[in-house]
Every structure is written in C-alpha cells, then in structure tokens.
Image (cartoon, rainbow, N blue to C red):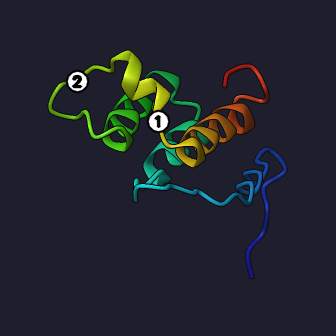
Amino acid sequence: MSTINADSTPDPPEPEMELKSEVGVDYRRLQKLLSEGKWREADEETTRVMLKAAKREDEGWFDGEDIEQFPRADLRTIDQLWVTYSDGRFG
C-alpha cells in the first residue's frame, strides 16, 4: 500500500488529445517537452516537426509556397499542443 506525502502533489493528468498528422509526423516528443515545461527544447522540436511535415528537412527553412501548403491538421495539432500546455500563453 502506498502513501502520499503531504508535501508532494500528484502530477496533473496529461490532457487527452489526438495528435493528428496528415503526413505521418509523430508529435509525442513535442507533447512530452511541452508537458514538462521545457519551452526552449519544445521550440526547437516544433521547428524540427514543422520542417518534417513540410518535407523541408534538407533545406532547413520554409518559403511562401511551403507555408501556403502546410498540412492544416498538423498546424492545428502543433497549435493545440502549445496552447494546452502553456495555458494559452503560446500557440
């Protein structure tokens, strides 16, 4: 039988959210970094997954056409993650 120390509080449960991607990008690492409040690492991971979703990993940057054609479900997923884990401060 386990006891809970009065000084410790359980971690809040992870929000249930579907991590949709039109192009097969895995957003679990981004979700983990955000849930841990690792904002700088999450920002870097956001860049990585966005480049992957746009198939611009080799180039390392976007042009106007890439942004216009960015998969909408992926953009919604990224935004939802940032808004949820930052309590609406980022997104």
Q: CA distance from mark 2 to mark 1?
A: 15 Å
Would you call the spot at circle 1 few (<14 residues within 10 Å), some (14-19), or many (20 or more)? some
Residue 62 sits in quarter: top left
Q: Nearer the viewer, residue 58 or 66?
A: 66
Instruction: Indicate the position of residue 19 as horizontal and vertical percent values.
Output: 58, 56
Q: Residue at x 73, y 60 (%)?
A: 16
Check disc 2 and report its element: helix, strand or loop: loop
80 to the left or right of 72: right
| Contact between labelled residues 1 and 2, with CB atoms less than 8 Å apart | no
The C terminus sits in image quarter: top right
Q: Earlier in the sequence, mark 2 or mark 1?
A: 2
Q: Nearer the viewer, residue 90 or 38?
A: 90
Q: Is residue 81 above or below residue 46?
A: below
Check disc 1 and report its element: helix, strand or loop: loop
Label placed on residue 20: none
Instruction: Indicate the position of residue 87 as horizontal and vertical percent values.
Output: 78, 30
Instruction: Indicate the position of residue 89 as horizontal and vertical percent values.
Output: 74, 19
Q: Is residue 73 above or below residue 49?
A: below
Would you call the spot at circle 2 few (<14 residues within 10 Å), some (14-19), or many (20 or more)? few
Which amino acid type is marked by label 2? Gly
Q: Residue at x 70, y 57 (%)?
A: 17
Q: Nearer the viewer, residue 9 or 51?
A: 51
18 to the left or right of 25: right
11 to the left or right of 31: right
Tell me the residue that label 1 is attached to. Answer: 70
Which amino acid type is marked by label 1? Phe
Instruction: Indicate the position of residue 6 as horizontal and vertical percent values.
Output: 84, 50
Tell me the residue that label 2 is attached to. Answer: 60
